[in-house]
Image (tube, rainbow, N blue to C red):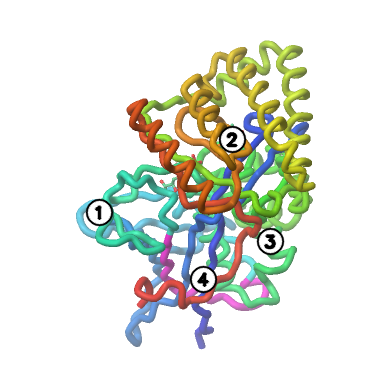
Amino acid sequence: MAIKHPTVAVSAPGKVLLAGGYLVLDRKHTGLVFGLSARINVIAGEIHTSQGVQLNEIMVDSPQFLDAQWRYGYHLAPEGGGIKVTQLQVGSVICKNSFVETTLSYALTYINRLKSRHSDHSLNPSRLIVLADNDYYSQSTPTNGEPGRFSKFTVPLSGANKTGLGSSAALVTSLTAALLSHYLPKNLFDISSSSGKRTLHNLAQAAHCAAQGKVGSGFDVAAAVYGSCLYRRFSPDLLSQLPEAGSPGFSEKLASVVDGVVWDVEVQTEGLSVPAGMALRMCDVDCGSQTVGMVKKVLAWRAKDASVSGELWDKLQTRNETLAAALRDGNVADVPAAVDAVRELIREMGKRSDVPIEPESQTELLDAVSAVEGVYGGVVPGAGGFDALALLMKDDEETKGRVEERVAKWSQEKDSKVRLLDVKGEMEGVRCEDLDIYSGWIQ
Ligand SMILES: Nc1ncnc2c1ncn2[C@@H]1O[C@H](COP(=O)(O)OP(=O)(O)OP(=O)(O)O)[C@@H](O)[C@H]1O
Ligand SMILES: C[C@@](O)(CCOP(=O)(O)O)CC(=O)O
């Protein structure tokens, strides 16, 4: 008899790298990573088929967007290749979602291996629904009617302008967590336990790297699993022996990477927080400019000018740690100077590598917003560039109002669109959710 799998919902937060961009790519250094209140939610349930109908299908829906349904058939690949998923054509066009597809192959392969070791070979069809908080996409993206927590957009996912909050990492993490929670009994996977989080982290990192076609530092997946933390990356070699999903031996190698080896990643959730009464908030800057290849260029400079760049990175690491300590220890008065000290070296790194990490327009904007009463300072987060700011400010409506006014004035004067998002820094990582939150979205 087929086992009934429960309908479950999980959510994982977005991220911001407040300090440690580029440095965090090197295990020698750490990053100040914050989880965000904007979450990607995934609800997993069974597909009920008519009696006698046998189908192996997984359906993933992102009902906030047009044409955002991805359907896959699945089968056991030969020679230990694990579960191979193949996208099914719905209608006349086939629209791919590599993050969804790769996550399904990775998670289902892992689940199937664990289940068969416990003499349970059922991998029933399932349906997954993805719901993303509104701040992941720019307001310029048209919506249908009054936006609730989950807006309905009038465009496909590819037409929505992202705000850079790490949607792919939060998606891969919550999709993996939803699949594990749906298919596995609690004694084999429990999202609230530390071993459950470790399994989820390792599996989601592997799937995310495969889907994006490169091994980054992984701070975004760590934020999605663990929330805010001081982060030291894993050695990239850990993932280098993994063959392509579906190829011979994939299943065993994946299990060994997830459970068989000790990861050298360090995630200190006690290492980072914001003082009571302070909030970390984000601004979306929509000025139409784009910078590609920033990481490549900074790393090329790091290698070429090793002694100068090494000294600069060490100094910046110390300043980042000073900022983390001021925040963690609640030394509010020390925060503005600590932020400025970090920014000074970020600008130097930008100048020396010839990369617009904190370009002049962002320097001006940061200085203008930092002068607003109640703002302790701000940075260009992550890789930097033109499109976002992270601000540390008083967590009250008056300060929020003043910042909104300042950025509105800036937008008018400079002909660029700057907007304070609703999202805030949050400590908690992945979690189970009550199904009630999603009424209207799940039938
Ligand atoms: N709501 C969603 N439903 C389904 N897939 C999604 C959703 N949101 C994001 N994705 C997947 O994540 C991809 C976007 O990932 P990408 O790494 O480009 O952006 P990001 O993670 O938001 O950006 P950044 O790393 O700059 O923060 C989409 O192409 C899609 O595959
Ligand atoms: C430049 C880098 O250190 C940070 C990129 O951060 P973001 O995607 O700009 O938030 C790259 C990485 O850590 O993978």
Q: In front of the other: label 2 or label 1? A: 2
As helix, strand or loop, the secondary structure at mark 1 comes to loop
Looking at marks 4 and 2 on the same chain, the residue that comes earlier in the sequence is marked by 4
Instruction: Report the mark closest to the observer, 3 or 2.
Output: 2
Q: Is residue 263 visible?
A: no
Local SS, label 4:
strand
Amino acid, disc 1? Thr
| Amino acid type at image mark 2 | Gly
Give the image location of residue 239, x and y in percent: 65, 43
Local secondary structure at mark 3: helix
Kindly identify the residue that appears in the image at 70 percent across and 26 percent down. Answer: 341
Q: Which residue is mark 2?
A: 378
Q: Name the amino acid type tagged 3.
A: Lys
Residue at 48% of width from left, 76% of height from top? 435
Mark 2 / mark 1, whichever is N-terminal? 1
Q: Which residues are magenta?
A: 115-131
Kindly tell me whether mark 1's CB lies below 8 Å from ligand 1.
no
- State how far apart marks 1 and 4 are (Cα): 25 Å
Q: CA distance from mark 3 to mark 4?
A: 16 Å
**Residue on which the image places disc 1:** 154
Looking at the rendered image, the disc whose residue lies closer to the viewer, 1 or 4, is: 1
Above or below, 235 relative to 413 = below
Q: Mark 3 or mark 4: name the one nearer the start of the chain.
A: 4
Q: Is residue 361 above or below residue 427?
A: above
Query: Which residue is identified by label 3?
Result: 197
